[in-house]
Amino acid sequence: MAENNISNNRSNKKSDLNKTDIYNKNSEKKTENYNKKTQNNESNSAKNAKNNQNTSKVSDKYIHKWWIDALIFIGGTLLLGGLATLLGGKMFNFQNYEMPPATAPKILFPIVWAIIYLAIGISTFLMWRDKEIKEDSRKINLILFIIHMVFNVLWPLFFFKLDLAIFSAVWLGLTVISALIVMYRYFITNIPAGIIFIIYTLWLMYAMYLNLGLVLINF
């Protein structure tokens, strides 16, 4: 009996030791899992913090850069308007030509054109600053705008300086077509920019009416 009791006590002690080992192992596993989760959470938090910092830097860069874009697009367009005036020489002097009906007073033209150049500069600025537009689309829009401005700036040279009324009418037709393309591109990507360009395009059409009317009446 005594031997049985001793053996039972030993087996109980072994089972207790086994249970203790199992408990300790489970505790260690739980501790390891907890540590891993904590490390993962900390690493995720660090990544999120870095992402937030990067986003903040990009946002700050975007905000701080707006005035540079304003100078480039608005100021640059106004400079192109000044270049067009220089190329045209004595602009808005229709010499001895008979003008078509609904011709505005000569004094109105330089005022309207100054406002127009300011407006299309703002329009291009709004398009370029729109982050929802893909970069490739913005670049295409800008290239089309630059091509259009080449037509725009050279027209006063042909019409006023060189007195090529018929050729300038054809050139102005190409200018209107390029304006329609830019207007469409702007409107589908940035509605305010497109609306401004619509107003400008309407003014171009009025200028084309005057140019064509002058040709039909005087030639």
Image (spheres, rainbow, N blue to C red):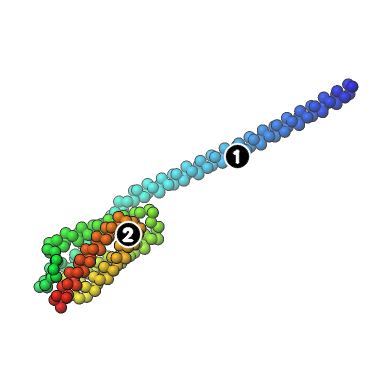
| Residue 142 makes an appearance in the image | no
Percent across and percent down for residue 49 are 47, 42
Give the number of marks: 2
Q: Gap between marks 2 and 1, in whole Å?
A: 53 Å
Looking at the rendered structure, the secondary structure element under dot 2 is helix
Q: Residue furthest bottom?
A: 219
The residue lying at 36 percent from left, 50 percent from top is 62
Q: Quadrant of residue 20?
A: top right
User: Closer to the N terminus: mark 2 or mark 1?
Assistant: 1
The residue lying at 88 percent from left, 21 percent from top is 2
Q: Residue furthest top?
A: 2
Residue 187's disc is 2
Disc 1 crowd, CA 10 A, few/some/many (<14, 14-19, 20+): few
- Horizontal side, residue 13 vs residue 77: left or right: right
> Label 2 amino acid?
Phe
> Label 1 amino acid?
Lys
Percent across and percent down for residue 58 are 40, 49
- Horizontal side, residue 15 vs residue 109: left or right: right
Q: Quadrant of the N terminus?
A: top right
Q: Residue furthest left?
A: 96
Image vertical order of residue 9 relative to residue 133, above or below: above
Q: Quadrant of the C terminus?
A: bottom left
- Name the residue carrying label 1: 36
Percent across and percent down for residue 80 are 24, 62
CB atoms at circles 2 and 1 under 8 Å apart?
no
Percent across and percent down for residue 26 are 68, 34
